[in-house]
Amino acid sequence: MLGGPGAAQDATDEIKKIAKDMKGKAEKALGETYGEFEAVKFTKQIVNGTNYNIKVKVGGEKYVHIKVHVPLPAKKAPNELLEQSKDKTLADPL
């Protein structure tokens, strides 16, 4: 969907990889270290590239939310961690 984010979906292998690649940056930004970091849900928003809001399980019933921008391939730029928040639950909306 162009403009607003779409409905939440189960994380695909591609989304799981994007989240795993952002683990170190998210841990640094949140001041935490996680043994588990597994994407479970996501939404996406098409902007000059794609923004992904990703719900990540970090152990037990604990989750974090990360927002990652994936630029258009022609830009040849790396993915960027835009936002992060901790102390989330599975039920919290993305």
Image (cartoon, helix red, strand yellow):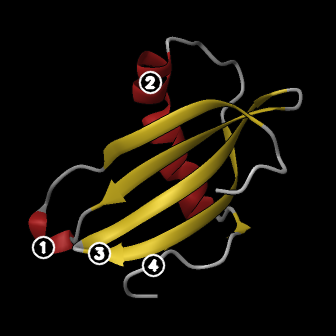
Cβ atoms under marks 3 and 2 closer than 8 Å: no
Q: Look at the numbered disc 4 and give the secondary structure of its residue.
A: loop
Q: Amino acid at mark 2?
A: Gly
**Whole-percent x, y for residue 83 in the image:** 41, 41
Q: Look at the numbered disc 2 and give the secondary structure of its residue.
A: helix
Badge number at residue 4: 4
Q: Look at the numbered disc 3 and give the secondary structure of its residue.
A: strand
Q: Which residue is mark 2?
A: 24
Residue that appears at 67% across and 42% down = 56
Quadrant of the image occupied by residue 24? top left
Label 3 Cα neighbours within 10 Å, binned few <14 / some 14-19 / many ≥20 = some
Q: Which residue is mark 1?
A: 74
Q: Earlier in the sequence, mark 2 or mark 4?
A: 4
Foreground residue among 41 and 17: 41
Q: Is residue 14 left or right of residue 21?
A: right
Cα distance in 3D space between marks 3 and 1: 14 Å
Cα distance in 3D space between marks 3 and 2: 25 Å
Q: Look at the numbered disc 1 and give the secondary structure of its residue.
A: helix
Foreground residue among 40 and 88: 88
Residue that appears at 68% across and 70% down = 8
Cα distance in 3D space between marks 2 and 1: 26 Å
Q: Earlier in the sequence, mark 3 or mark 2?
A: 2
Q: Which residue is mark 3?
A: 47
**Whole-percent x, y for residue 20 in the image:** 53, 39
Badge number at residue 2: none
